[in-house]
Image: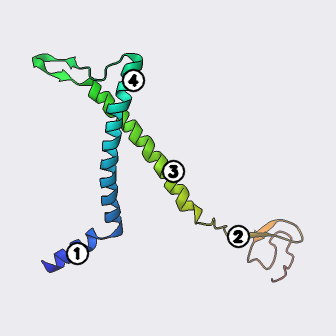
């Protein structure tokens, strides 16, 4: 049992698992903010401009309703969340790339000084004109 608990502790305290947990908590809080923003600001604004009511329901049998307004609100929430996540990921990727230098690939060919064709970088003789190349 001790070995099992030790393995679980190592797993749970890994950086990726902790990052994921923090992301889920922040995502849930952010989702609540976006939901409140949509329901309390965007929906009344749209209803005031266009006269649309996002609280409308479509009656079906037995006194049940399809809550179309709630569905539209969820779609608006999703679009706002997806756009915000897109912007955050663009910012994070830009920040991550600032410190990195682009590594230039080492050249694999060089020009022959005699015939000007490309030859392998380690070649000592040109395969095209058979000239002996100088060692550098």
Residues at discs 2 and 1 in contact (Cβ within 8 Å):
no
**CA distance for labels 4 and 2:** 61 Å
Q: Which residue is mark 4?
A: 46
Q: Earlier in the sequence, mark 2 or mark 1?
A: 1
Task: Give the residue at x 63% y 65%.
Answer: 102
Q: Earlier in the sequence, mark 4 or mark 2?
A: 4
Q: Is residue 39 left or right of residue 126?
A: left
Residue 9, how many percent across, how many down? Answer: 23, 73
Task: Give the residue at x 17% y 75%.
Answer: 4
Residue 19, how many percent across, how many down? Answer: 35, 62
Q: Quadrant of residue 66?
A: top left
Q: Quadrant of the C terminus?
A: bottom right
- The nearer-to-camera label among 1 and 4 is 4
- The dot on residue 90 is 3
In depth, the one of 100 and 108 nearer the eye is: 100
- The nearer-to-camera label among 3 and 2 is 3
Q: Is residue 8 left or right of residue 89?
A: left
Residue 125, how many percent across, how many down? Answer: 81, 77
**CA distance for labels 3 and 2:** 34 Å
Q: Which residue is mark 2?
A: 108
Q: Which residue is mark 1?
A: 7
- The nearer-to-camera label among 4 and 3 is 4
**CA distance for labels 4 and 3:** 29 Å
Label 4: how many residues lie within 10 Å, few (<14), some (14-19) or many (20+)?
few
Query: At numbered mark 1, what does the secondary structure look like: helix, strand or loop?
Result: helix
């Amino acid at each position: 049992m001790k070995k099992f608990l030790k393995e679980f502790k190592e797993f749970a305290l890994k950086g990726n698992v902790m990052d994921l947990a923090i992301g889920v908590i922040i995502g849930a809080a952010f989702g609540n903010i976006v939901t409140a923003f949509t329901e309390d600001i965007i929906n009344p604004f749209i209803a005031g401009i266009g006269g649309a009511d996002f609280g409308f329901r479509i009656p079906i049998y037995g006194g049940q309703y399809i809550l179309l307004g709630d569905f539209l609100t969820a779609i608006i929430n999703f679009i706002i969340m997806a756009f915000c996540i897109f912007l955050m990921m663009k910012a994070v990727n830009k920040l991550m790339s600032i410190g990195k230098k682009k590594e230039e690939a080492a050249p694999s060919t060089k020009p022959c000084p005699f015939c000007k064709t490309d030859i392998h970088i380690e070649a000592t003789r040109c395969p095209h004109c058979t000239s002996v190349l100088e060692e550098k």
